[in-house]
Image (cartoon, coloured by chain):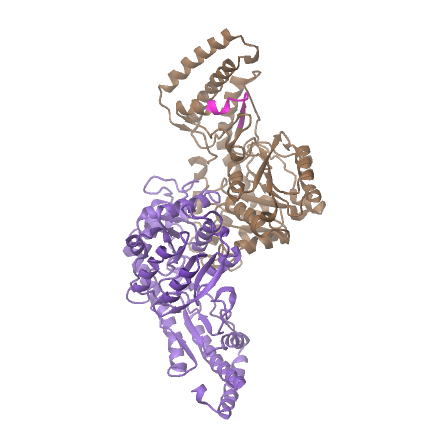
Chain colours: A purple, B brown
Amino acid sequence: MDIDAATREQLQNWEKELNAQYQRICEHELSLDITRGKPSADQLHLSDGLDGILNGEYRAADGTDTRNYGGLEGLMCARELGADILQVPVEEVIAGGNSSLTLMYCAVLTGYLFGYAGNKPWKELEAPKFLCPVPGYDRHFAICEQLGIGMVNVPMTDSGPDMDAVEALIEKDRDIIGIWCVPKFSNPTGVTYSAETVERLAQLGRIANPGFRIFWDNAYAIHDLDNQVNLANIRTATVENDTADSVIQFASTSKVTHAGAGLAFVSASSDNLASLKKQMQAMTIGPDKINQLRHARFFAEFTLLKEHMHKHAQILKPKFQCVLSHLEKAFKDSDLGEWENPLGGYFVSFNTRPGCAAAVVELAAQAGVKLTPAGATFPYGVDPEDRNIRIAPSFPPLDELDTAMSVFVLCVKLASVRKQLEML
Amino acid sequence: MDIDAATREQLQNWEKELNAQYQRICEHELSLDITRGKPSADQLHLSDGLDGILNGEYRAADGTDTRNYGGLEGLMCARELGADILQVPVEEVIAGGNSSLTLMYCAVLTGYLFGYAGNKPWKELEAPKFLCPVPGYDRHFAICEQLGIGMVNVPMTDSGPDMDAVEALIEKDRDIIGIWCVPKFSNPTGVTYSAETVERLAQLGRIANPGFRIFWDNAYAIHDLDNQVNLANIRTATVENDTADSVIQFASTSKVTHAGAGLAFVSASSDNLASLKKQMQAMTIGPDKINQLRHARFFAEFTLLKEHMHKHAQILKPKFQCVLSHLEKAFKDSDLGEWENPLGGYFVSFNTRPGCAAAVVELAAQAGVKLTPAGATFPYGVDPEDRNIRIAPSFPPLDELDTAMSVFVLCVKLASVRKQLEML
């Protein structure tokens, strides 16, 4: 299919044929869902040994009675797990509750209401704003939107955010006080930032507002499908550039153990952590240390965690292969769409021809296949070119995913042909 | 000892004698702590069956896979537990994570930044402020202080806050948008609000700013030492007064199961909950449902919870008796101090003669007995009369508590005599 070169008649024939296929699928009354990056039941099952692992022994190795109150920074053994995942010193890690999103919210709130490390609270700036590499993660954008922090789109490339654009924006606007980054297996494009990108990000602290912070959501730090993909260490890079205060890192075990009941981690310089802890201590006496102890026992050594992640990869790989082979088969050498081949993470990001994404999502919905709403991967839910669709292959069983992808590629074709007809 | 009637010489003799006793105690180099309302190891042990209770069955009765993401309101069976504790309809309850303080913070933040149920955000008022019955709970005050919400002291009586003062303040100041209440076994006085107080509180919604909210922290709802003390139902009272939006209730199992790893609950009208959920959904995908399921299984029936609380009472009662008998023996019929006899909760609140509390805490500290800092029970840490000291008997073993109380009463006597000498 070469849509740009097709005549009206050819397009009309395609539309008729594709629509007939589509109508037949609609009759099947499917009910499939590939919207969110949720682990499958098989994956969750890998961690079922967590409940009961304590065997009545609620004391941590350092003597802490995990059942009682206290310990805003979390248990030492849980902080060590976070330090291993993020590859940072343990004293720069806080181990929290079940949600890294909560830690991110607290971290944004801290900058917005109180300011980091003696800097002016962002709310006192005329128009505080975050740079948002797009497509990106809707829940990051929702935090900014709720707090009234502006968002500026920056394109994602295959080596991370477009750093020329990032630097130019920061140089000309002192009210840019943050950037959202998912540096490894980026949500949704699957891209891992190159070493050069990490280095250039680490240098931003030299030119940006001193209150500027990189929100480094390393959600997929150990979520490789095959060989380990290396991400340059942002902490090392900022320390070397004398910009250690410019980054706040996050990770979690949500896609390692149980998605709703894992541990979250935040890591930053001691000055940043001091600001953050001041906010957090008004909000909580401390995290659930019992669940932290469970995790520390479950992953008594980092090699156990690595082996555990390998089991996840074995379950996830066929699902990614399913999505990618559908896309390859349908769109290779066509002008109907573009995508990356992720080496890990939870998503495949697909770009339709301009102006087709919303129509694809709508067609799929009517055929019983639920996709992430078009635009969701952009601030304010607005994809300026209406192109991006996030595919989340992890949750459904393989046969359902296969069916859903058949519907997806058909909807892409049908929407593309119809769009072209409209424009002729 | 009748200090007011004593001569200088008599006071000097007392001082000498008490100081000699005090110096002997200091030589013992004690290290005792009666600062915070933490359950003892014996109490925590009552809930050790929680870990492992799931026996591999992670699905809730309604089919929810508790291991995965989702469900901002919490599991239905956990919400039911909260509804039983607060005696409210389950659809008005959200079951959260391990901290009711977090839910309170979110609830204050919602009012402050976004406003409840269409009302103006508090931050847009000239001088938003909370009424704070004093003495009260330091962590309540810390939330207001952090967000820059003003605090106005209102005296606690033996039937709750001085309602004449509350009503007068609210009538004359539209910027009063909240009041902190611990209605049963109040922290720290141990008082339970009378039915009349509850009724008058429920009527405040008629005269206050429409954005006004009562923060009803029912932390000790089921924490009776003996017979059940009845607290009038504030929800019923507000519904009858057509002021249902004026109250937000909180509870937790922190002092029921494991203090650091329990469940927290918030309950309010559907309009209030809608406002709160809007804030919360930017902050979390949902609470730890696995721990919620553990609790629901542990307390499969409300009677089990009642029996469990009876076991707590059996452990706590001798400790309260110890504190009270020390106070009785030392100060009955004296003018050295005042206290309530709490029928539940976690504290005994002691008022020294004016201007003595800080000195008592300092003397006790030097003798190796750590007390809650004087002033901690007041907004901004300032007790205008320097009188209140919160005693927390729950955590130390009985013999240590007994020793600590001997030191305490001695320090009260010594500080009182010294103060009187200063003033002569």
Residue A287 belongs to the span the image colors magenta: no
Q: Position of residue A273 (x, y in %)?
A: 39, 47
Lateral position of residue B257 relative to residue B161, left or right: left
Q: Position of residue B227 (x, y in %)?
A: 59, 33
On screen, residue A65 above or below A378:
above
Q: Position of residue B344 (x, y in %)?
A: 55, 33
Q: Is residue B189 visible?
A: yes
Q: At x 52% / y 42%, what residue is drawn?
A: B143
Q: Which of the 4 image quadrants contains residue B126?
A: top right
Q: Which residues are magenta?
A: B349-360
Total number of numbered discs in the rendering? 0
Lateral position of residue B156 relative to residue A284, left or right: right
On screen, residue A303 above or below A270:
below
Q: Is residue B74 visible?
A: no
Q: Which of the 4 image quadrants contains residue A366?
A: bottom right
Q: Residue furthest bottom?
A: A9
Q: Position of residue A422 (x, y in %)?
A: 54, 84
Q: Nearer the viewer, residue A73 or A370?
A: A73
Q: Residue furthest top?
A: B9
Q: Nearer the viewer, residue B273 or B321?
A: B273
Q: Nearer the viewer, residue A282 or A205?
A: A205
